[in-house]
Amino acid sequence: MRDIGLAVRELLTAEVRHAAEAWFGGQKSAERLARAAWSVLTEPGDGVAGELIASLGAEDALEAAARATRRPADSVALADATARWRPRWDAGLVEAALRQGVRRDLQFVIPGDAGWCAATDALGAHAPVGLWVRGDAAVLGRGGASVGVVGARAATPYGELVTTDIASELAADGAIIISGAAYGVDGAAHRAALRTSSPTVAFVAGGVDRVYPAGHAEMLQRIAETGAIVAERPPGAAPTKWRFLARNRLIAAASAATVVVEAGVRSGSLNTANHAATLGRPLGAVPGPVTSSTSAGCHRLLREYGAVCITSPDDVRELLGLGVDHPLETRGDPELTRVSDALARRTPRSIAEIARLSGLAEGSVIGALGLLALSGAAVERNGGWEAG
């Protein structure tokens, strides 16, 4: 690393740089180390740090910050920012983060990396300086559809059912399901994706090495094995209320569209929805009973934010701008309708079971299934038939 000043050498000591070289190797090690240091110094979304880095680069921005800690800053904003950063200007904190990254086999991705989530660049000065990743960082840089599915922690059975239906179908189609690993809707979305053996991404408020919430330890391990757990704060950082709110902007930015399944009037999911709307990203909300407090936030999104009403996975596909295959029109043929109604998604049913459920003879069921199969509305699988 080039000489960037005494004050910065106090932060990026020989021990810190040795730890960085051991982890990063020759892969943009100086830039990566500077951004890792910034992730230790700042809270997520620090706009002053973002502007400084965008203007000077991560290394020179550290030098400018170091100078500002030694003498009056050029602006009130920078003076306030250096007051925030000064308590963390500690080489030991940076070294500890790097060594934990090595121990836990984490990755630290920065702009320009193959695994960088370029969609978060839309946050401008409030974009992350880097992302700590447990799992496969390549999932972040993958092209294609990504859907943020968020909602109430205290989800109702209705909310979990709708979440599972939407997330499992979209994941099976190849979409990346993004959420926040919380209880309720978040957990249902991740688990639905995992059941289809599809990668899913969890943006968390603390360090990626922390298991939070504790009840999701097994789920988080499975996410890390096939997808990615992502954070802005370094390993060991505790999740706090502010960091949850800051994390929400990443879910909105990383997602091509955001769907809120259930949300109370004070739900943090409305914060995610607001970020999506501010970024101009498609926003959807699932309606619920007008008497349900857990759907009040969704109804507000539909009424005041212009959110699209989501009642099925096809609605989300349209929100993403994807084509939707419309099944064969069945309303004119009672037998087709009855057989179609007797089919389930992802649960193959035998001819005999379909006949029993539809109230038709098996011969009529076989004929109807043939017509439904032509349009893709029915699929033969594992010795039975299911909805297409």
Image: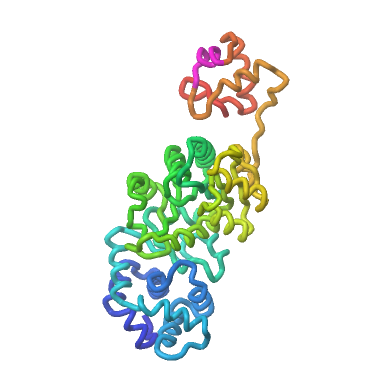
Up-down: is 353 above or below 69?
Answer: above
Is residue 3 visible to us here?
Answer: yes
Is residue 169 visible to us here?
Answer: no
Quadrant that contains the C terminus: top right
Residue at the (46%, 66%) spot, across then down:
44
Q: Nearer the viewer, residue 162 or 333?
A: 162
Q: Is residue 276 left or right of residue 221?
A: right
Q: From this viewpoint, which residue is outermost toward the bottom?
A: 71
Up-down: is 349 above or below 238?
Answer: above
Up-down: is 82 above or below 72?
Answer: above
Q: How many marks?
A: 0
Snapshot quadrant of residue 132: bottom left
Residue 242: give x, y in percent of width and height.
45, 63
Up-down: is 4 above or below 315?
Answer: below
Q: From this viewpoint, which residue is outermost toward the front?
A: 291
Magenta-tinted stretch: 349-357
Residue 193: give x, y in percent of width and height.
46, 42
Residue at the (61%, 60%) spot, across then down:
279
Q: Nearer the viewer, residue 85 or 304?
A: 304
